[in-house]
Image (cartoon, coloured by chain):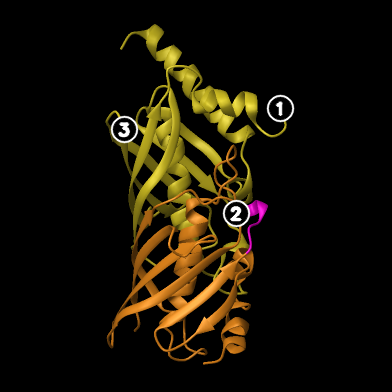
Chain colours: A yellow, B orange
Amino acid sequence: MSAINNKKNAERFAAIAELWNSRAKGLILEMNLKIEQANQEGVQIRMPFNPDFCLDEEGTMLHGGVLTALLDSAFGLANFIAIDSIESMATLDLRVDYLRPAKSRADVLVFADCYRQTRHIAFGSGKIWFDTGDKEEVARGTAAFAITRGTSGSFLDKLNTTGPDK
Amino acid sequence: MNISDIQARCDRVPFFRFLDFTITQADETHLLAQMPFAQRHIGNPILETYHGGIIASFMEAIASICVLDDLNAAPAKPINLNVDYLRPGFAGTLTTRATITKKGRRMASVETEAWLEDEAKPVAKALFHFLLV
C-alpha cells in the first residue's frame, strides 16, 4: 500500500474512532471505553474497573455478561473500521467462552477484528484479558453480523448528522 | 423457592441492580423476569435499541439464578453462551424466560428467550452452559 493510502486510511480510522467516542451513548458510555488501537489489524479497547459490573458487593469479580457486552461493542467498532460505507449492522449471533473467572480490579482490555466480510455478512472474533501483565485470556468470542452497504450516507455519516443532539 | 427470596438474592448483586430486573414467576425448571428499559441499556445510538450485551446479560442472569438449588449457594459458573439475535430490541420492557434443558451433578444447560410485547416474536434466544461444582 502506498504511503498516501496509508495516510488516508490512518485519517479515516482516527475519524471513525473519534466519532464513535464522541457519539457514545447508553452502555458504551457507562463502560467508559477508551480506544487504544483502531486499524486494519483490528481494534483494542480499554474498560476501567467498575464496581457496578460486579457479582459481589466487595467488587472482586466481574459478571460474565459485561465481558459479552464488551466483545459485542468491540465487534461493532471493528466492523466500522474494516468495512467501507457500512449503512447498517445487526448482530446475528454471538458466541462467548468464559475461559477464567473475571477476578481482578485491573482495567479490562478487549481486542476484536473483522476477519472476513462478504457483501451481506461480517465475521468477527475477539478476546479479553486484564491489564495485569500476564495477558491470560479471560474470554473469547465470535460473532456474525448482517451488514448493509450504502451507496450514500454511511452509518457514521448518519451518526454525524442525525444524532439526537444535532 | 419463593419469588421474594429470589429477588432478595438478586438485589445483592451489583450488576443485577444495574440491569434492574424483577423476578415474576418461578418453578423447578423455569424462571421469568422483567426488565424496564433504561438509557444505560442503549446500544445503537441512532435507533436507541437495547445493547446486545445487555440482552445477553439479562438472559445470563436469569439462567444463572434458574439453576441454583440453594439461594445461599455460590453462583453457578458460566462456561459459555450462544445468543441468536432475532429482532431489534426497541425501547420497552423486556421479558426473559429461562428453562433448564438438562441439569446433571456437574453441568447444566439452560435455554432462554427474551421478548418485548409479544412472546411469539422473541428479540433473542440463547443457550447457556453452567458449571455447578
Nearer-the-camera pick, A74 or B22: B22
Q: Secondary structure at mark 3?
A: loop
Whether residue B40 appears in magenta in the rendering, the answer is yes
Type of the residue with mark 2: His
Q: Are marks 3 and 2 on the same chain?
A: no
> Label 1 crowding class (10 Å Cα cut-off): few <14, some 14-19, many 20+?
few
The disc, 1 or 3, on the residue closer to the chain's N-terminal end is 3
Identify the residue shown where x is 63% and y is 51%.
A30
Q: Position of residue A141 (x, y in %)?
A: 34, 52
> Label 3 crowding class (10 Å Cα cut-off): few <14, some 14-19, many 20+?
few
Task: Give the magenta part as a residue range.
Answer: B36-41
Left or right, residue B3 beside residue B109: right
Q: Secondary structure at mark 2?
A: helix
- Label placed on residue A120: 3
What is the chain identity of the residue bearing mark 2?
A: B
What is the chain identity of the residue bearing mark 1?
A: A
What is the chain identity of the residue bearing mark 3?
A: A
Type of the residue with mark 3: His
Q: Disc 1 and disc 2: Cα gap in Å? A: 21 Å
- Label placed on residue B9: none
Identify the residue shown where x is 42% and y is 17%.
A151
The quadrant of the picture occupied by the C terminus of chain A is: top right
| Residue topped by disc 1 | A166
Type of the residue with mark 1: Lys
| Residue topped by disc 2 | B41
Q: Position of residue A50 (x, y in %)?
A: 61, 59
Is the Cβ of the residue at disc 1 closer than 8 Å to that at disc 2? no
* Relative to A113, residue B4 above or below: below
Q: Nearer the viewer, mark 3 or mark 2?
A: 3
Q: Quadrant of residue B66?
A: bottom left
